[in-house]
Image (tube, rainbow, N blue to C red):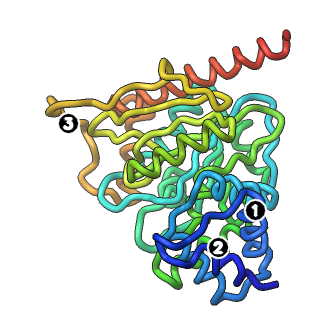
Amino acid sequence: MSISHYIKEIGRGSAGARSLSIEQAQDLMGLVLDGQATDLEVGAFAIAMRMKGETVDELTGFLAAVQARCVHVHSRQPVVVLPTYNGARRLPNLTPLLAMRLAQEGVQVLMHGPRHDPKRVSTADVLHDLGLPIAHDVAEVEQAWARREPAFLCVDALCPPLARLLDVRWTIGLRNSGHTVAKMLDPVQGAPALRLASYTHPEFGELMAAYARQGGASMMLLRGTEGEAVADPRRQPRIEAWIDGQPRPELGCPAQEGVLATMPLLPRTHDAATTALYIQAVMSGEKPAPDPLETQVALVRRTLASMAGARRVDSAA
C-alpha cells in the first residue's frame, strides 16, 4: 500500500505543508513500520517531516503506532524509562552513571537505544566496558532488575520495525521522526513509568511539554547533554516535571546562571573505556559525582515518590 497521499500533504515545504490528524499520523507510521511503503517513499517521508516539523497530534499518532509494535516490559514498581539514542561526541557519556546512581538508590531503570553508533560513543559501548550486560529480551531486563542493576534493552529487541526506521539515517544522512518518537516510548506495563526526555532546541522542548500535557504523561524534561537525557556535568540545566500531564514545578529546578566558580573533575577523553573507569571511580566513592547529576537523581526520586503518593490517593478514592 502506498503512502504517497500522505507525502502529498506533508511534503509541500515548510509553508505549504499540511499537518496530519492523530489518526492519519498513526496510520502513516503504521504503514511505514509494517513495510507497506517503498524505500523511496520512506526516504520522502523522513525528509518531508524533517522539513515540516512534527505537531503534537502527529507525535501522538506516530507514538501510538510505534507503541503498538513494541514489546511490553512488566513491572510491579515504578520504572524510570531512560532513552539513549545520541551518545557522546565531545563530553563523556554519563547516561550509564545516571542509571547506575538511580539503581543504587533502589530505582528500577530501563534504558533503551542502539547497540552502536559509528560516529559517537554510545551508552551500550560504555556499559560493555563497565561489564554490564545488554538485554536482548524482556526476561534479561527482569534479571538485571533482580540484580539491582539498570537494564539496557536494545531498540532492535524493543521494537524491530522502529530500529529499521532509525537505520534510514545512515542512508539519507538525516535523523527522522522515528528518532523523536524513540525518545518518548513507554513500554512499561503494570506500573507507572517516569520518562526522562531531553531536547537540544527550545522549540522542541516546548513541543515535548505540550505532549506531556496533552498526553497525560509523567515526564521529566531537560536540555540534554549532546542529546542525552542526563544533566550537563558542568552546569545545572533547567529541569521540568509533569505527573499525569500536570506540571509540577516543585519537582524541577531552574537553570544555573552566571559564571561557573568550579569545574567538575571529568575525564580528559570521552572514549568508552575512559568513561567507564571514571564511572567506576564515582560509584566506588573514589571521585565525586557531578553536582548537576546528583540534583537530577534527587529530583527523579522525589518525582517517583509523588507519583506513588498520587497512586495511593487514587486507589483509596
Q: N-terminal of the two: label 1 or label 3?
A: 1
Circle 1 or circle 2, nearest the eye: 1
Q: Which residue lies at the image location 14% right of the left edge and 29% below the top edge?
A: 261
Q: Please, what is the three-letter code of the amino acid marked with disc 3?
A: Met
Q: Please, what is the three-letter code of the amino acid marked with disc 2?
A: Leu
User: Can residue 271 be seen in the rendering of this structure?
Assistant: yes
Residue pointed to by mark 2? 165
Residue 131 x/y as whole percent: 55, 52
Choose between 286 and 152: the one closer to the eye: 152
Per the model, the C-alpha gap separating discs 2 and 3 is 39 Å
Q: Which residue lies at the image location 39% right of the left edge and 48% below the top edge?
A: 202
Mark 3 secondary-structure assignment? loop
Residue pointed to by mark 3? 263
Residue 7 x/y as whole percent: 64, 79
Looking at the image, is 109 positioned above or below residue 19? above
Q: N-terminal of the two: label 2 or label 3?
A: 2
Mark 2 secondary-structure assignment? helix
Residue pointed to by mark 1? 26
Q: Quadrant of the N terminus?
A: bottom right
Q: Please, what is the three-letter code of the amino acid marked with disc 1?
A: Gln
Residue 170 x/y as whole percent: 51, 80
Q: Quadrant of residue 239?
A: top left
Q: Is residue 48 left or right of residue 75?
A: left
Q: Residues within 10 Å of mark 3 (few under 14, many from 20)?
A: few
| Tag shown at residue 88 | none
Mark 1 secondary-structure assignment? helix
Are the residues at dot 1 and dot 2 in contact (C-beta closer than 8 Å)?
A: no
Looking at the image, is 252 positioned above or below residue 213? above
